[in-house]
Image (tube, helix red, strand yellow):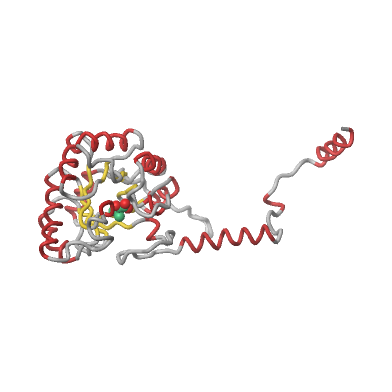
Amino acid sequence: MSAGARVSPAPPAKRPAVTLSRLAEKKALGEPIVMVTAYDYPSAQVAEAAGVDVVLVGDSGAMTVLGYPSTVPVAVDEMLMLAGAARRGLTTPLLVGDMPFGSYEVSNEQAIATAQRFVKEAGCDAVKLERGGSSVDRARAVVEAGIPVMGHVGLTPQTATALGGYRSQGRTAERAIEVTRDALALQEAGCFAIVFEAVPAELTETVMPQIDVPVIGIGAGPATDGQVLVFHDLLGIYDGHAARFVKRYANVRQAMIDGVAAFAEDVRERRYPEPEHGYTMAPDESERLRALLADS
Ligand code: KIV
């Protein structure tokens, strides 16, 4: 090779699609599992390019992209539109769709019908539902219908009012036992993974030896098998209140504001567009145009 020759970087190795067994294998090997939320085509493409293992189309999208004050109002149809867009941006991570409040609690039939829509209409690989209690039966029914289910215990935002608000859970021994029972019941119902949200690290550490499926934490300490953060929180896109467990890895919102403000200023100062941003006409064509207009 001659001096100065350019060496093209090797194309990124194509990763095999992440499956349920790969997640179980990662747990067994002690390899941390990375999950992020995504709600549209570009955020899913970012998750894909960043090499995450699992993408959750979380009902947090109700707040981060749809502007609702909580996750409660979001409809199944809205979630399906977000999930379908995320699907089109992904090939490798496992795609999990969050079943929204009111779409699975009434009966096992309702839960199965909603889960089937996430798989058939949006192309999700799995669904997520919140809470123990009656959700355990719903999880079992959906798993028996052939759709993988991710559970979610601790702070469950869909029922935050009943939990006393958006606050950490399981901080007394009695409440910690309740969270533990929920997690064990969801595992027994066949969930392939469980999210632990906003619970003390000590609780997680104590329970982990009893949980055979991957546990993905968010504000649950370091003992889990993986961690999840909301896309808009970790990138600093969302302007609302951030929970204690959020770590900001970028300030994308400010970068977007700066970009749009710079565009606005360029337009107002007539600095944009410049010649390279436009199209030209051959001189003889513009000549002919002037002649045609003069004749008309
Ligand atoms: O909706 C969501 O984003 C979630 C994650 C926080 C786990 O449920």
Name the image quarter holding residue 140.
Answer: top left
Tell me the quadrant of the picture where the C terminus can be found: top right
Which residue shows up at 34% across the image and 37% down it?
A: 123
Residue at 39 percent of width and 42 percent of height: 78
Q: Nearer the viewer, residue 71 or 150?
A: 71
Residue 41: percent from the left, percent from the top?
43, 45
Front one among 81 and 229: 81
Name the image quarter holding residue 282: top right
Q: Position of residue 161 (x, y in %)?
A: 26, 56
- Residue 120 screen position, x and y as percent: 32, 33
Q: Is residue 240 visible?
A: yes
In this rendering, position of residue 142 left or right of residue 284: left
How many marks can you see? 0
Left or right of residue 214, residue 286 in this image: right
Residue at the spot x=38%, y=50% of the render? 62
Which residue appears farthest toward the right when viewing the image?
295
Which residue is pictured at 67% across the width and 57% down the height? Answer: 267
Location of residue 196 (image quadrant): bottom left
Between 185 and 8, which is closer to the camera in this rendering? 185
Q: Does 88 appear above or below 244?
A: above
Q: From where the camera sits, is residue 35 visible?
A: no
Image position, residue 217 (x, y; %): 24, 58
Q: Is residue 151 above or below residue 174?
A: above
